[in-house]
Amino acid sequence: MGSVFLPHLRTGWHVDQAILSEDDRLVVIRFGRDADRECMLMDEMLYSISAKVSQFAVVYLCDIDEVPDFNEMYELYDPMTVMFFYRNKHMMCDFGTGNNNKLNFMVGDKQELIDIIETIYRGAVKGKGLIIFRSKQQPLVPLGCLGTCVAVAMAAKGVRTGNARSAQKWFRWRVGLQGLTIVALLAGSFYFDKTLREGKTEQELAIEKARMRERLWIEELERRDEEMKERQRRAELARKRKEDAEASKGD
């Protein structure tokens, strides 16, 4: 039912435009065959969360038989594939499956899928605003750079006006501010590198959860397969008993 309500991309041009048209939201595209069971399940899940993620993501569907343009480019050989794009850039996502280009397995619950999409979106935004993000992390570095520029400007002014005393003073300030900036940069880098090593990032937690869900899903499929084999075995035994009983009655 989800595939009825979610927008379909009918041509390669529509796929390109969907990726190019979004500047601030993550573009989520489900590639696959609309009639495939896995695609139908994923479509239902994507539709159920589409309103919740609409502030930072938009969801599209694309049938790989109707639009084969990207099958070779993105290696769309799985029954169901979900890919993520941000500002015309394909977002990589490591789910521990050995394929960093896409999500090609069923996610167990809606909240986990929301977490995955939000994590990829946050990673994309951080990549976009890396300089702003780092400046907020280490505010002394941009302040030190600004102070150094001011000191150089004031020293240059002193040289131009012939005020040697003022120029020397501001040159000393420049050296001091440069030194403080370098110390702040090294100290901040050491601190945040240590913090990142000690703590798990949101992406790592999402990957861990995805791996666990994949393992549980495989175990569930194996369990169902065993149950089916057991039912077939019992049915075969029942059939043989019935045939033996009919044969004995005939004798």
Image (cartoon, helix red, strand yellow):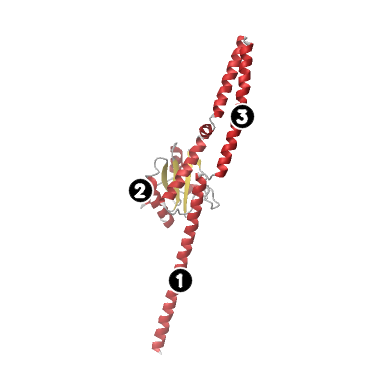
Query: Does residue 88 appear in this view?
Result: no
Q: Position of residue 64 (x, y in %)?
A: 46, 51
CB-based contact (under 8 Å), mark 1 and mark 2? no
Q: Position of residue 97 (x, y in %)?
A: 53, 53
Q: What element carries label 1?
A: helix
Residue displayed at 53% across by 30% down:
139
Mark positioned earlier in the residue sequence (1 or 3): 3
Q: Give me the C-alpha separation between circle 1 and circle 2.
A: 39 Å
Amino acid marked by disc 2 = Phe
- From what the image shows, is residue 192 above or below residue 32? above
With 48 as the anchor, is 79 left or right in this view?
right
CB-based contact (under 8 Å), mark 1 and mark 3? no
Amino acid marked by disc 1 = Glu
Image quadrant where one finds the C terminus? bottom left
Q: Position of residue 227 (x, y in %)?
A: 45, 68
Residue under label 3, please give it. Answer: 182
Residue under label 1, please give it. Answer: 230
With 162 as the anchor, is 225 left or right in this view?
left
- From what the image shows, is residue 64 above or below residue 225? above
Residue 17 — which label? none
Front: mark 1 or 3: 3
Nearest the eye: 6 or 54: 54
Mark positioned earlier in the residue sequence (1 or 2): 2
Amino acid marked by disc 3 = Ile
Front: mark 2 or 3: 3
Residue under label 2, please give it. Answer: 5
Q: Is mark 2 on a helix, strand or loop?
A: helix
